[in-house]
Image (cartoon, rainbow, N blue to C red):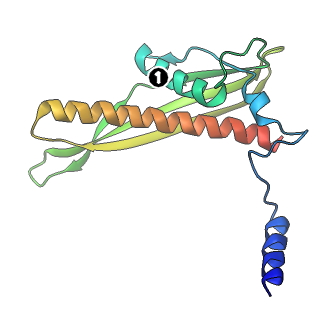
Amino acid sequence: MKLFKYLSIFLLICSCGFKPMYKETPYNNLSEKTASIAISPVKVFDGAYGVELRNKLLNKLTPLGKPENPKYILDITLSEPNILDYTIKTDGTASSYLVKMYAVYTLKQKKDFKVLFTKTANAEISYNILKNQFSTEMLKKNAIKLTIDDLANQIYFAVITYFTER
């Protein structure tokens, strides 16, 4: 009975088109492909946020260091954080803010600069306004950091999905 159960689960998984994203095959060696991506300095209004985004992507895509002979170039343009009133109290004042950021990124081949894909990643995180202004400022910085983390994850997954589907 157990054999039938496991066999039916196996057949269901195989028939749905499931394939492991990280499985190394002769046709899909993800670690080699991502290790051959050169990440250009991020175009951004403020260099600190761009450096943080670039460093996160370097750690994810090329953990063994800068590629010697990159085959691909990843160009990224990061927006400045847009901070909006998110929750309004009955007296008309804000009780929380929303941080919105986006990044436009392009993956190109290095040899002929052929664009493989261009996409946009959007992220937003909210934070509360506290009575202590210093604490509110720390929450704002943390919200921006979390937004950049989210953008880095979206870019990373878009790149590995591109290489997996090819």
User: Can residue 46 be seen here?
Assistant: no
Number of marks in the image?
Answer: 1
**Which residue is the site of mark 1?**
52
Q: Residue at x 62, y 35 (%)?
A: 156
Q: Residues within 10 Å of mark 1 (few under 14, many from 20)?
A: some
Q: Position of residue 124 (x, y in %)?
A: 41, 41
Extreme-front residue of the structure? 2
Front position in the image: 145 or 107: 145
- Horizontal arrangement in the rendering, residue 136 relative to residue 11 (left or right): left
Front position in the image: 3 or 79: 3
Q: Position of residue 56 (x, y in %)?
A: 53, 27
Q: Position of residue 15 (x, y in %)?
A: 85, 68
Q: Is residue 45 above or below residue 78?
A: above
- Horizontal arrangement in the rendering, residue 149 relative to residue 62 (left or right): left
- Of the 4 image quadrants, the one containing the C terminus is top right
Front position in the image: 89 or 108: 108
Going by the numbered disc 1, the residue's amino acid type is Glu
